[in-house]
Image (tube, rainbow, N blue to C red):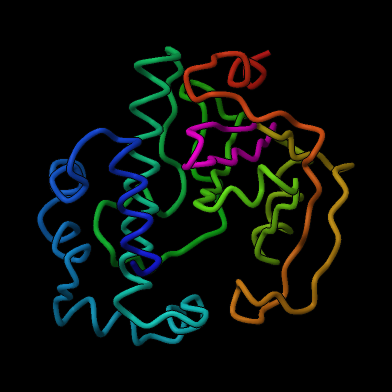
């Protein structure tokens, strides 16, 4: 089983339904077709643009496209889940709020903001392997890390790590004082530079546990 098939299998267990159908319902037919390995000519051209080639890391076009769609599925599901289970209204804030694959304005903006507030933002990081939960080691792309640090000077910013295998999450406040160490080359980011963080002091909570999310509005 390749990496994408493994991720889809895990997400189907978490979402509780066929992921292709869920994708079609939430994001539309084009997005669901991408998960099946079908790329329209327009998408193929977009994936060949310089900006997308840089973001691919070591992935081929179809695997990169699938990963982008999976990211969108997760954010839509979390938005609905936290509203239904926690009564928390999150709004999609980053470039993944666009339903289809193509986006010519990719930004470093956090994935969510708390509805009705201009001061509380959440950046979501999905982990399929349990690595972050086990080790406490979290990695951010260099531009993302720098952007979130800068934003945290004026707003409340949290890192939400979703551990898919255990269906648990942790919320880490991103503050000016949060230690980050620079990594010159990180293999998982295609050899690009990154920042590392140690979040081992923050406990992972079951998704249904409302205690972690409450800290965002405290």
- Image coordinates of residue 45 in percent, x first then y, are 26, 85
In-image side of 136 versus 3 (left or right): right
Q: What secondary structure characterizes most of the magenta part? A: strand
When the figure is inspected, residue 144 is found, relative to residue 178, above or below; the finding is: below
- Image coordinates of residue 36 in percent, x first then y, are 17, 65
In-image side of 19 versus 107 (left or right): left
Name the residue furthest left: 29
Residue found 37% across the figure and 25% down from its top? 81
In-image side of 91 versus 58 (left or right): left
When the figure is inspected, residue 173 is found, relative to residue 7, above or below; the finding is: above
Residue range highlighted in magenta: 156-170
Quadrant placement of the N terminus: bottom left
Q: Quadrant of residue 163?
A: top right
- Image coordinates of residue 32 in percent, x first then y, are 16, 57
Residue found 41% across the figure and 39% down from its top? 92
Counting the numbered discs, the total is 0
Q: Quadrant of residue 46?
A: bottom left
Quadrant placement of the C terminus: top right
Towards the viewer: 189 or 49: 189
Asked whether 162 falls inside the magenta stretch, the response is yes
When the figure is inspected, residue 148 is found, relative to residue 154, above or below; the finding is: below
When the figure is inspected, residue 201 is found, relative to residue 108, above or below; the finding is: above
């Amino acid at each position: 089983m390749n990496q994408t098939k493994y991720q889809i299998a895990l997400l189907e267990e978490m979402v509780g339904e066929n992921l292709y159908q869920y994708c079609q319902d939430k994001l539309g037919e084009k997005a669901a077709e991408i998960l099946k390995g079908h790329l329209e000519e327009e998408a193929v051209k977009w994936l060949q643009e310089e900006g997308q080639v840089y973001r691919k890391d070591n992935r081929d076009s179809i695997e990169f496209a699938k990963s982008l769609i999976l990211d969108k599925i997760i954010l839509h599901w979390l938005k609905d889940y936290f509203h239904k289970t926690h009564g928390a209204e999150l709004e999609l804030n980053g470039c993944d709020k666009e339903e289809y694959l193509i986006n010519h304005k990719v930004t470093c903006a956090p994935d969510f903001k708390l509805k009705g507030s201009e001061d509380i933002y959440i950046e979501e990081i999905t982990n399929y392997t349990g690595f972050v939960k086990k080790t406490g080691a979290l990695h951010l792309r260099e531009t993302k890390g720098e952007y979130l640090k800068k934003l945290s000077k004026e707003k409340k910013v949290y890192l939400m790590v979703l551990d898919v295998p255990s269906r648990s999450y942790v919320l880490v406040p991103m503050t000016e004082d949060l230690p980050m160490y620079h990594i010159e080359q990180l293999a998982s980011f295609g050899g690009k530079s990154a920042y590392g963080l140690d979040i081992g002091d923050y406990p992972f909570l079951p998704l249904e546990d409302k205690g972690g999310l409450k800290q965002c509005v405290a």
